Amino acid sequence: MATPLSSEVLHGALTGDDPTVRSVAALELGRLGFAAVSTPLVAMIVDGRSDVAAAEVLGRIARSSSMQAESVVGEIARALRDTTEAAARLRLVQSVAEIATPGADALLDALATDEDGTVAATATAIGAHRARDVTEAKHGGRERSRQGNTTGTVGETGA
């Protein structure tokens, strides 16, 4: 639980000179529910600084409300438009996997035709994975049980 003093210190750290300190502050504030750190979290993804953790925290922020979710998706979409570096764009599209909203799905659909084949393939794969999850949820998991052994013990006979 954040205290007013800890929140104040973390907010102050967001503007510091040290990128590591800024990153830690953004991650912690995001984990505490401060949605205003979406912009620095997206910047972390672009820069490749703790990008997986930043994407997870953005996902948490997005799950807090549909308004926050669409704001986060908008931040990611803007960064994708403004970023030409292939690795950064790939990290951004991967971050959308953490956000399950119609806006995120629409962004993935748009990215499925991106001129960068890796971005397009990644967006397509994330979208396909989501579609499979939705299908399985609608069928109560019957799809998975029809696929056979999912325990990772292929070849065991139980004898």
Image (spheres, rainbow, N blue to C red):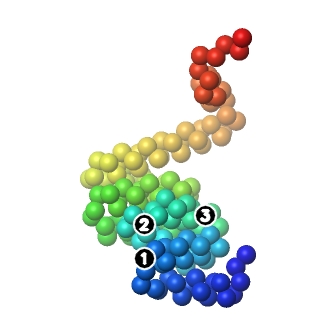
Tags 1 and 3 touching, CB below 8 Å: no
Q: Is residue 103 above or below residue 33?
A: above
Crowdedness near tag 1: few (<14), some (14–19) or many (≥20) residues, C-alpha within 10 Å: some
Number of marks drawn = 3
Foreground: disc 3 or disc 2: 2
At a point 43% along the width and 43% down the height, the residue shown is: 125
In the rendered image, residue 124, in percent from the top left (x then y), is placed at: 41, 45
Residue under numbered circle 1: 19
Foreground: disc 1 or disc 3: 1
Q: Earlier in the sequence, mark 1 or mark 2?
A: 1
In the rendered image, residue 16, in percent from the top left (x then y), is placed at: 46, 85
Name the residue nearer the viewer: 155 or 120.
155
The image quarter in which residue 4 lies:
bottom right
At a point 34% along the width and 61% down the height, the residue shown is: 88
Residue under numbered circle 2: 49
Residue under numbered circle 3: 60
Helix, strand or loop at mark 2? loop
Tags 1 and 2 touching, CB below 8 Å: yes
Label at residue 7: none
Query: Can you name the residue that lies furthest to the top here?
Result: 159
Crowdedness near tag 2: few (<14), some (14–19) or many (≥20) residues, C-alpha within 10 Å: some
Amino acid type for the residue under numbered disc 1 = Pro
Asked whether residue 56 appears in the rendered view, the answer is: yes
In the rendered image, residue 50, in percent from the top left (x then y), is placed at: 47, 64
CA gap, disc 1 to disc 3?
22 Å
CA gap, disc 1 to disc 2?
9 Å
